[in-house]
Every structure is written in structure tokens, then in C-alpha cells.
Image: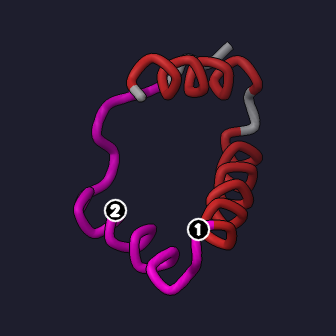
Amino acid sequence: MAALDTSARFADPDGAYRIVVEAVRPLDEAASAAFMARLVLILANQIGDASVLAEAVDLARRTG
């Protein structure tokens, strides 16, 4: 069973952030929420481990 890795993994974290921000910038609130939901599901599938996903969900809830 894998564990959630919260260490910095992007060589350019600000650049990664900009990619997401620029993707939602032209969208209204509903379209932005739908886009983010799709993105989360795509990335969750990439992780492919329900226990890691559960850890990430828990972390997001605690840090929001």
C-alpha cells in the first residue's frame, strides 16, 4: 500500500500552479468547478490507489 507523498515534486511549482490557473481563467464559476472536478478525477485515476486518494482527500479537508 502506497502512502501519500506530500514532498515538493515539481521542478517549477509556480509554473505548475500557473498551468491550472490559466486553464480556469476564461471560465465562469460553474465551468471552472466542472473543469476542476474533471481534472481531479483524471489525476485520481493517474494515482490509481484508493488509499492514497483517501489520504489526499483527508489532507485537503484538514487544510482547507
Q: Is mark 2 on a helix, strand or loop?
A: helix
What's the magenta region? 5-29
Residue 17 got which mark? 2
Question: Splitting the image into 4 quarters, where does residue 8 fall?
Answer: top left
Residue at the bottom extreme of this rendering: 26
Q: Specify the amino acid type for callout 1.
A: Glu
Residue 64 lies, with reference to residue 54, above or below; the image says below
Q: Specify the amino acid type for callout 2.
A: Tyr
Q: Which residue is drawn at 74% across and 50% down?
A: 41
- Of mark 1 and mark 2, the one earlier in the sequence is 2
Residue 21 lies, with reference to residue 40, above or below; the image says below
Q: Which residue is drawn at 60% across and 26% down?
A: 57
Residue 29 got which mark? 1
Q: What element carries label 1?
A: helix
Q: In this view, does 30 lie to the left or right of 61?
A: right
Q: Where is residue 3 in the image (x, y as percent from the top left)?
A: 55, 17
Question: Splitting the image into 4 quarters, where does residue 30 fall?
Answer: bottom right
Which sits in the foreground, 64 or 9?
64
